[in-house]
Image (cartoon, rainbow, N blue to C red):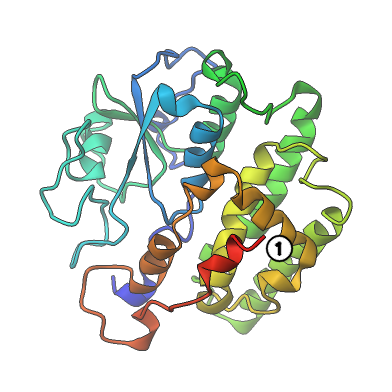
């Protein structure tokens, strides 16, 4: 597969269809045990980054470790993730160099492209969960005993239905759209997705005219998901996926909201603009030989802190 079409984290299914990678804490399949799990994520990935933010926000970083994979595909290898720039660089905890090694510890017959996020049981090296949706919801509810004392209540019981509905809107109408656009083969298909994306942004802009956060004056789980999409909008999606009706700062409420979220350490510390641009534009370690793989210098990251 060529670099121009290898948008490695542009689209991620909610499930890869293999139940071996869909184990849950809430069903008792997975023990809730501190220091047993390691989240493999990517600083660039809009599906994995929300899980990384949630872990830090809730104080779960004290009991669940994280491993960020290398931002680029290795030259000539577009079907695996590596833990470092070298083919044999190992994660210090998992002692593997490729994420596929951990997938095959779970399923020896696994021969697909491994996806992130991937939650790994460090006692076995096996990947036990790969669904961004499930990990967000499971960690929000099943791990409450390990939340930091000052952690926000991001999944209050009386708002659970509203949270799940808002998550659905964000994932289907924003997070998934860039990856779907990258696969279109007609003008009509592109325009339909384009309209769906900006209809949702318009709706959110109106909603945030009266709310500090999506569901009121307090941060909840959907805010993590939306923030991750907004961070990537101007930097990548506006140009690469032709989602160019307006820029983020053309939406005053969304732009205020995004910068407000950015001030929260768990959000800011898991936001890496350079990694995002490197992955989506440069894509791999192959020598850059065309403009479409040149990393843009902007937008100016300082604008996120000038608040």
Is 7 on the left or on the right of 240, as rendered? left
Residue 78 is drawn in which quadrant? bottom left
Q: Residue furthest right?
A: 210
Q: Nearer the viewer, residue 118 or 270?
A: 270
Q: Quadrant of the N terminus?
A: bottom left
Q: Is residue 241 above or below residue 205?
A: below
Q: Residue at x 78, y 66 (%)?
A: 252
Q: Residue at x 53, y 73 (%)?
A: 300
Q: Is residue 33 above or below residue 305?
A: above
Is 106 on the left or on the right of 60, as rendered? left
Q: Is residue 119 above or below residue 3?
A: above
Is 224 on the left or on the right of 88, as rendered? right
Using the rendered image of the protein, determine whether residue 176 is visible from the camera's viewpoint: no
Locate residue 75, reporting x and y percent. 19, 67
Residue 256 is drawn in which quadrant? bottom right
Q: Residue at x 72, y 55 (%)?
A: 257
Q: Nearer the viewer, residue 31 or 221?
A: 221
Q: Is residue 45 above or below residue 119?
A: below
Locate residue 50, reporting x and y percent. 53, 44
Q: Nearer the viewer, residue 248 or 284?
A: 248
Q: Residue furthest front?
A: 306
- Label 1: element kind: helix
- Mark 1 lies on residue: 255
Residue 307 is drawn in which quadrant? bottom right
């Amino acid at each position: 597969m060529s670099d121009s079409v290898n948008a490695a984290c542009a689209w991620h299914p909610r499930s890869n269809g293999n139940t071996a990678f869909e184990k849950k804490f809430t069903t008792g399949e997975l023990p809730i045990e501190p220091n047993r799990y390691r989240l493999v994520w990517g600083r660039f990935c809009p599906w994995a980054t929300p899980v990384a933010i949630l872990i830090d926000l809730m104080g779960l970083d004290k009991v669940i470790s994280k491993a960020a994979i290398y931002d680029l595909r290795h030259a000539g290898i577009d079907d695996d993730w590596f833990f470092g720039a070298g083919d044999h660089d190992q994660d210090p905890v998992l002692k593997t160099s490729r994420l596929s090694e951990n997938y095959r510890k779970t399923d020896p017959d696994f021969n697909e492209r491994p996806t992130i996020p991937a939650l790994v049981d460090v006692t076995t090296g096996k990947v036990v969960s790969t669904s961004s949706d499930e990990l967000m919801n499971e960690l929000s509810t099943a791990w409450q005993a390990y939340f930091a004392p000052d952690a926000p209540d991001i999944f209050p019981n009386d708002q659970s239905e509203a949270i799940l509905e808002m998550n659905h809107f964000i994932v289907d109408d924003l997070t998934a759209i860039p990856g779907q656009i990258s696969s279109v083969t007609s003008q009509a298909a592109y325009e339909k997705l384009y309209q769906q994306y900006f209809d949702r942004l318009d709706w959110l802009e109106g909603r945030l005219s009266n709310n500090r956060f999506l569901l009121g004056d307090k941060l909840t789980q959907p805010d993590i998901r939306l923030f991750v999409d907004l961070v990537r909008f101007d930097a990548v999606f506006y140009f690469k996926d032709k989602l160019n009706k307006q820029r983020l700062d053309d939406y005053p409420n969304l732009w205020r909201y995004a910068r407000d979220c950015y001030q929260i350490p768990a959000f800011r510390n898991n936001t890496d603009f350079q990694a995002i641009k490197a992955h989506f534009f440069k894509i791999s370690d192959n020598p850059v030989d065309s403009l479409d793989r040149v990393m843009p210098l902007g937008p100016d990251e300082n604008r996120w802190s000038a608040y």
